[in-house]
Image: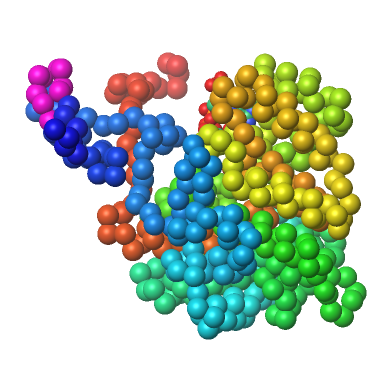
Amino acid sequence: MSKPTLTITDNRTGRTYEIPITNGTIRAMDLRQIRASSDDFGLMTYDPAFTNTASCQSSITFIDGERGVLDYRGYAIEELAEKSTYLETAYLILNGELPSRSDLLGWVHAIKHHTLLHENIKKLIDGFHHDAHPMGMLIAIVGALSTFYPDAKNIFDREVRREQIVRLIAKVPTIAAFCYRHSAGLPYAYPDNDLTYTGNFLNMFFKMTELKYSPNPVLERALEVLFILHADHEQNCSTSAMRSVGSSQVDPYAAVAAATAALYGPLHGGANEAVLRMLEQIGSVANVLSFIARVKQGEGRLMGFGHRIYKSYDPRAKIIKQMADRVFEVMGRNPLLDIALELERIALEDEYFVSRKLYPNVDFYSGLIYQSMRITVDMFPVMFAIPRTVGWLTQWEEMIEDDEQKIARPRQIYIGHARRPYVPLDER
Ligand code: ACO
């Protein structure tokens, strides 16, 4: 007879416990009742890096890593990438449903009317060196926005929350573009409300002396698709940082700054930059075999390969790879593409990568497209942070509205010294 429970026998005591199974999960707190003695704290689970622990219930993004499936709110990423726009997808992620025509107009209007930055932000940007990494600048400036909008700390007021969400989605591209213009020594280009979200980003990035910037429609659409693909990815490192930091009830600017910092790392959103630098370092197709051999010997990783969740081809990488050709038609073929294709070909046949189920992830081809679009390499992680902002904020809001959530506070297994007497300096 089948029953949705788990029976555990504690061999230390001979006692048996029956624990409910819901959604293929047991509650860690149900283990606490399992004690070897009356002064025993109770059983805990040990899960470094949270490889088998669900930290929340969520209805935003679904991933089936074995089958390479990614859905936002029940819509397949492939369909959204083909038919939607970034702002429509952002609305879907945030609100759970696709917008009506009038809802979409209102949403796009709201975002477009919050793209400007307080002029003091420019002074902050001016304080950075010309070669400051734009991710470091983005983290600092998003964090600083917290001081411009002190009202944002009212996180339990839905209207206040929504206002900050609109501000962040609208302002992060402006901050990103201004950081680039600062490092390039170019004057800041202000937002143009006539353009789409991505068209305006290209305007703020590339506008020179022309009175009106017209984005290339192929590049504008490519950016739109890249932004859709990066909008959310459930409980990854930066989203967990967002939820964890946000659980202290800090304002969303501080929490997004923390999430951005988590994204910066080369094992996460910094990987697209690392891929490009790796391809440049390999230099030519002839060097691919020896590079792979070094990776297999443990000398570094094949950046842009492997994923904690995907154990088949990352569906986002598939779409990006197909889209790359359209960008190359406009901008010319990226010479590093041949190295990337050869790396992928060899890795997908090699026992080391096959047995570990290592496939290209979202970062493997995105950098090649960004580079072809003339976006500078150190901007790549920033290009990831812009669209992910909506994912972070939606996950943060879901956490705030979830009665089960409280301040994130994992346990530890203490393996250090037992209490001992202080040793005076002369006696050490
Ligand atoms: N190159 C070579 N070997 C790899 C790679 C890689 N890119 N990724 C994993 N492996 C190997 C590991 O060495 C390990 O081998 P072992 O079992 O012999 O020790 C095995 O595959 C499993 O790897 P883990 O590190 O345990 O896998 P984990 O789930 O912790 O890591 C991660 C996932 C961080 C993405 C990893 O695959 C990686 O470092 N990839 C390169 C960086 C990258 O592209 N990051 C972007 C991910 S997508 C994103 O964040 C948006």
Number of marks present in the image shown: 0
Image coordinates of residue 226 in percent, x first then y, are 66, 56
Q: From the viewer's side, name the closer residue of 88 and 301.
A: 88
- From the viewer's perspective, tell me whether residue 179 is left or right of residue 57: right
User: Do we see residue 302 in this rendering?
Assistant: yes
- Residue at 85% x, 62% y is 185
> Residue 117: which quarter of the image?
bottom right
The residue lying at 30 percent from left, 21 percent from top is 418
Q: Magenta span has 127?
A: no
Q: In the image, what residue occupies the spot 69% across and 49% down?
A: 320
Return the x and y of residue 179 as percentages of the image width and height. 73, 61
- In the rendered image, the quadrant that contains the C terminus is top left
Image quadrant of ligand 1 equals: top right
The quadrant holding residue 184 is: bottom right
Q: Quadrant of the N terminus?
A: top left
Colour basis: rainbow
Q: Which residues are magenta?
A: 9-17
Above or below residue 405? Residue 294 is above
Residue at 60%, 66% (x, y): give it.
84
Residue 13 belongs to the span the image colors magenta: yes
Image quadrant where residue 356 sits:
top right
Looking at the image, residue 87 sits to the left or right of residue 96; the answer is right
| Residue 301, placed above or below residue 175 | above
Q: Position of residue 302 (x, y in %)?
A: 68, 30
- Answer yes or no: is residue 374 visible: no
Q: Nearer the viewer, residue 117 or 401?
A: 401
Q: Residue furthest front?
A: 1
Residue 21's place in the image compared with 426, above or below, is below
Image spot of residue 278 (x, y percent): 76, 34
